[in-house]
């Protein structure tokens, strides 16, 4: 299997490709979130938390994602994580796009339409994740928290991610977020989808980088 180097690169390396790719990836990510929400069959753990908070406050879904992103960034400080422009763009662009997409995507009329929104949203999320991560302009707040905790504790990234997502899932469910078959589908599908698209969308520096076996 190809090993893709995802370490951040300086902004001045290939900016004409990387910055547009970052923005397109984040726009697609916010749209994919809205599609899964409209499908109402279950959403990913962080969005369960966002939806739960939205249910308990007058804030829009996008506003909640932005506030949560900023709070998560504060947790980077003791972990000595360094944000990039992609980190900041992640907070701002996704928050704006998900609210805009929710405003234009109608409520589905029946189960087939809901399933189509769920499946399409998860696949699009995989493409979007590969696009913004592959731009190598800095991780999103939640990704940085995961890798930072893994680095500080010595635990595996898989274990840290599982603990974080289980925690936010339970918290979101208790607050009224939607948990369902879509939540399970997302958990099973997003890893393989992202892995499939990363080799196609990752920007390579061309300075000694190569794909490994």
Image (cartoon, grey):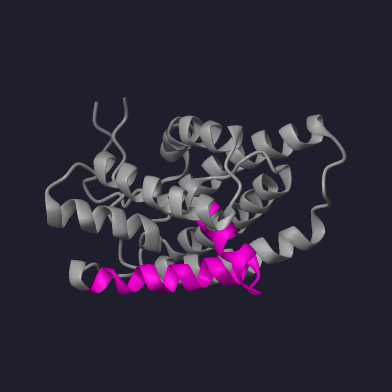
* Residue 8 can be seen, yes or no: no
Q: Position of residue 26 (x, y in %)?
A: 55, 58
Residue at left offset 26%, top offset 46%? 160
Residue at left offset 72%, top offset 59%? 101
Image-quadrant location for residue 143? bottom left
Asked if residue 101 is among those painted magenta in the image, a careful observer would answer no
> Is residue 16 rendered to the left or right of residue 99?
left
> Is residue 76 rendered to the left or right of residue 131?
left
Name above or below for residue 3 compared with residue 58: above
* Residue 77 can be seen, yes or no: yes
Residue at left offset 52%, top offset 71%? 66
Q: Position of residue 16 (x, y in %)?
A: 49, 64
Asked if residue 70 is among those painted magenta in the image, a careful observer would answer yes
Q: Position of residue 172 (x, y in %)?
A: 50, 54
Name above or below for residue 71 compared with residue 193: below
Given the current orientation, which residue lies at the most extreme front position?
A: 174
Q: Position of residue 205 (x, y in %)?
A: 31, 52
Residue nearest the viewer, comparing 181 with 11: 181
Residue nearest the viewer, comparing 164 with 135: 164
State whether the magenta stretch is mostly helix, strand or loop: helix
Instruction: Give the position of the N terminus as an image quadrant.
Output: top left
Name above or below for residue 130 compared with residue 31: above
Residue nearest the viewer, comparing 1 with 142: 142
Q: The magenta stretch spans which residues?
A: 48-77
Instruction: Give the position of the C terminus as an image quadrant.
Output: top left
């Amino acid at each position: 299997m190809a090993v893709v180097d995802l370490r951040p690169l300086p902004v001045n390396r290939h900016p004409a490709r990387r910055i547009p790719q970052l923005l397109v990836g984040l726009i697609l990510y916010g749209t994919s979130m809205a599609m899964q929400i409209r499908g109402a069959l279950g959403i990913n753990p962080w969005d369960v938390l966002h939806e739960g908070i939205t249910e308990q406050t007058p804030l829009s879904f996008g506003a909640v994602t932005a506030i949560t992103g900023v709070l998560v960034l504060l947790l980077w400080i003791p972990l000595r994580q360094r944000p990039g422009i992609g980190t900041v763009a992640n907070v701002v662009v996704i928050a704006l796009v998900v609210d805009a997409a929710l405003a234009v995507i109608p409520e589905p009329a029946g189960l087939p339409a809901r399933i189509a929104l769920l499946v399409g949203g998860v696949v699009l999320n995989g493409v979007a994740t590969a696009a913004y991560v592959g731009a190598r302009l800095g991780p999103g707040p939640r990704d940085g928290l995961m890798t930072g905790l893994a680095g500080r504790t010595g635990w595996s990234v898989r274990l840290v991610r599982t603990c974080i997502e289980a925690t936010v899932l339970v918290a979101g469910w208790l607050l009224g977020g939607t948990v369902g078959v879509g939540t399970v589908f997302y958990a099973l599908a997003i890893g393989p989808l992202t892995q499939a698209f990363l080799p196609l969308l990752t920007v390579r520096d061309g300075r000694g980088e190569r794909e490994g076996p």
